[in-house]
Amino acid sequence: MNEHDSERMAGMLEAEGYVKTTAAEEASVVVFNTCCIRENADQRLYGNLGHMKRIKDLREGEMRIVVAGCLAQKDKDLIQQRAPYVDVVLGTHNLASLPRLLSESHEGPAFEILEQTEVFPSALPARRTSPWHAWVSISIGCNNSCTFCIVPAVRGREISRRTGEIVAEVEQLVDDGVIEVTLLGQNVNSYGRDLDGRPLFAKLLRELDRIEGLERIRFTSPHPKDFRADTVEAMADCSRVCEHIHLPVQAGSDRVLKRMKRAYTRRRYLEKVAMVRQAIPDVAVTTDIIVGFPGETEDDFKETLEVTAEARYDAAYTFQYSPRPMTEAADFDDQVPKAVVQERFDRLIALQQRISLEQNQRHIGCSEEVIVEGVSKKDPSKLSGRTRTNKLVHFDSDGAREGAFRTVRITGALHHYLEGVLTDGRNGEPRARLTLPLVASGTGCNTCS
Ligand code: SAM
Ligand code: SF4
């Protein structure tokens, strides 16, 4: 969501005649677009601002510093107090005000934080960072009240964008050369409830699936409590929707899930994973997990390990619980000591890495369609690309450009990426779905091996 907002801010600045530079020493405007989901972002901002102040001082009035995003929304006046040299502060609800505030800042600091969204960010110009992939916001804000999460406080109530507008944006993107979109919302499965009273996400997927020239549709995130059969059916029916679901579990113990106010149980969650695996046999499942939520006991944590083992995630984003202001859990009086959290966290990572490795090894011997993302960061003589299941593959380079399709045979697997070699067989059309065995065999998939 923040990357998407950054693209919009860059787009507005370009429309004003600014051009991008990668050197702060040359910049006339530096924008920090912030996130406050976890505490370390707070701490990093003020360090980064201090560094930028030193550069600004050398530039003698030629540079202006902007702080935008969730942290600005949360900290409001604090930024002015702690960093009075910041020229513009704007929150999550008024991205559109950036050009006006910048021009006002010639007269002195311009700070504006609103409590409600003025203009849906998607209505603003964008400077897309990728020619072939685009983030597409389908809703902003969140109506849930997970007790650990600051998002509702800084992003506000959920507002869905009209389906016609989303379809029109994606059609335009495809005309501009985009082949993959990722739909964004804090809870994509409640998309549309504020439009006509019922969730419309499955219908949206079906409408987008009809767009000629669009190759891949991804989305993040569905909330497990609202993730239902109609979405799974749409995923299975729509050939452009990728075989990947990110279904954040957060914790494995019902007691912890209840205190988190997640509104599902471990059993209901695992049923949903089973439902999607049954409908789309080669689907990749990823998740978010929080370790050390207040009151989490060793037994609770063991249940998180059990769910992790049972769900057999392809990958997991694992977080140590971070108390956030304006959230209920920050006031719970049974915070878990840091050393205990760290020890559990290490155990969870070790388990997940083993499972990720086994899940990845199942692909060895398979032919996979990838979209090239560019030169491999691991080995510059290679390219990297992503499979429909969102796995990163490093493979020998034939000079293909970003956004090209290639077919690669998977020759190796580590827990966080695959290795492959180019094979004949591209294509132009999305490949037929492969059927992989559910349980690790290490010897490739049913179809290829
Ligand atoms: N809307 C998504 C959902 O409900 O699953 C989550 C969006 S949140 C921006 C991304 C992830 O950050 C969460 O899934 C959670 O795992 C993590 N997170 C949020 N608040 C956190 C906190 N206070 N401490 C640690 N991790 C947190
Ligand atoms: Fe935060 Fe929960 Fe909303 Fe996700 S669903 S953004 S975790 S409040």
Image: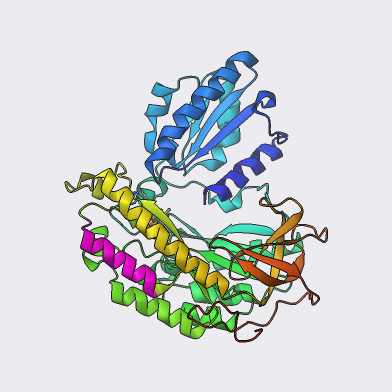
Question: Which secondary structure dominates the residues rendered in magenta?
Answer: helix
Residue with the most extreme right position? 399
Residue 63 x/y as whole percent = 62, 22
Judge from the rendering whether residue 244 lies leftward or rightward of residue 210; answer left or right. Answer: left
Q: Residue at x 58, y 84 (%)?
A: 435
Q: Nearer the viewer, residue 108 or 404?
A: 404
Q: Residue at x 63, y 82 (%)?
A: 433
Residue 57 x/y as whole percent = 58, 15
Q: Nearer the viewer, residue 249 or 318?
A: 318
Q: Is residue 211 above or below residue 298?
A: below
Q: Quadrant of residue 189?
A: bottom left
Judge from the rendering whether residue 295 lies leftward or rightward of residue 149; answer left or right. Answer: left
Image: magenta residue range: 296-310
Name the quadrant where ligand 1 sits: bottom left
Q: Residue at x 37, y 28 (%)?
A: 78
Q: Quadrant of residue 11?
A: top right
Does the segment drawn in magenta span residue 298?
Answer: yes
Specify the color scheme.
rainbow
Q: Nearer the viewer, residue 318 or 4?
A: 318
